[in-house]
Amino acid sequence: MPPGDRSVAYELSELGGSLSDGRLAALGQWAVDHADQLLAAQERHSTGIGNGAAVR
């Protein structure tokens, strides 16, 4: 392989692929459906609001 032409290919193992029967898709859809809430929670955590970090 010539320098600079490096690539990486990722794929699920057979065991990992067994998640694609709907369970992984359901988790992905849940994340999409709750994206606003997840981002708000992440922001609160990052700024220390509501996680007890700012309360002493």
Image (cartoon, rainbow, N blue to C red):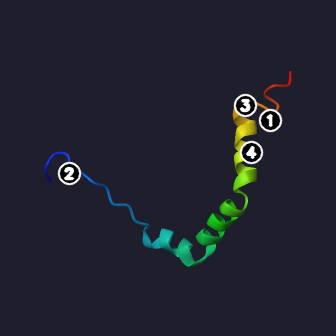
Q: Which residue is mark 3?
A: 47
Q: Nearer the viewer, mark 2 or mark 1?
A: 2
Q: Which residue is mark 1?
A: 51
Q: Residue at x 59, y 69 (%)?
A: 24
Label 1 sits on a secondary structure element that is: loop
Tell me if label 4 and label 3 are in contact, CB under 8 Å.
no
Residue 14, given in percent of the width and then of the height, sits at 44, 73
Q: Which residue is mark 4?
A: 40
The numbered mark, 1 or 4, whose residue comes first in the sequence reads 4
Q: Which residue is mark 2?
A: 5
Tell whether 1 sits left or right of 56.
Answer: left
Cα–Cα span, label 1 and label 3: 9 Å
Q: Residue at x 60, y 76 (%)?
A: 22
The numbered mark, 4 or 3, whose residue comes first in the sequence reads 4
Could you tell me which quadrant the C terminus lies in? top right
Instruction: Please identify the residue farthest to the left as the structure is shown.
Output: 2
Cα–Cα span, label 1 and label 4: 12 Å
Label 2 sits on a secondary structure element that is: loop
Residue 54, given in percent of the width and then of the height, sits at 81, 25
Residue 16, given in percent of the width and then of the height, sits at 49, 68
Cα–Cα span, label 2 and label 3: 41 Å
Q: Residue flagged by tag 4: what amino acid is it? A: Ala
Query: Is the residue marked by circle 1 packed among few (<14), some (14-19), or many (20+) residues within 10 Å?
Result: few
Label 4 sits on a secondary structure element that is: helix
The numbered mark, 2 or 1, whose residue comes first in the sequence reads 2
Tell me if label 1 and label 3 are in contact, CB under 8 Å.
no
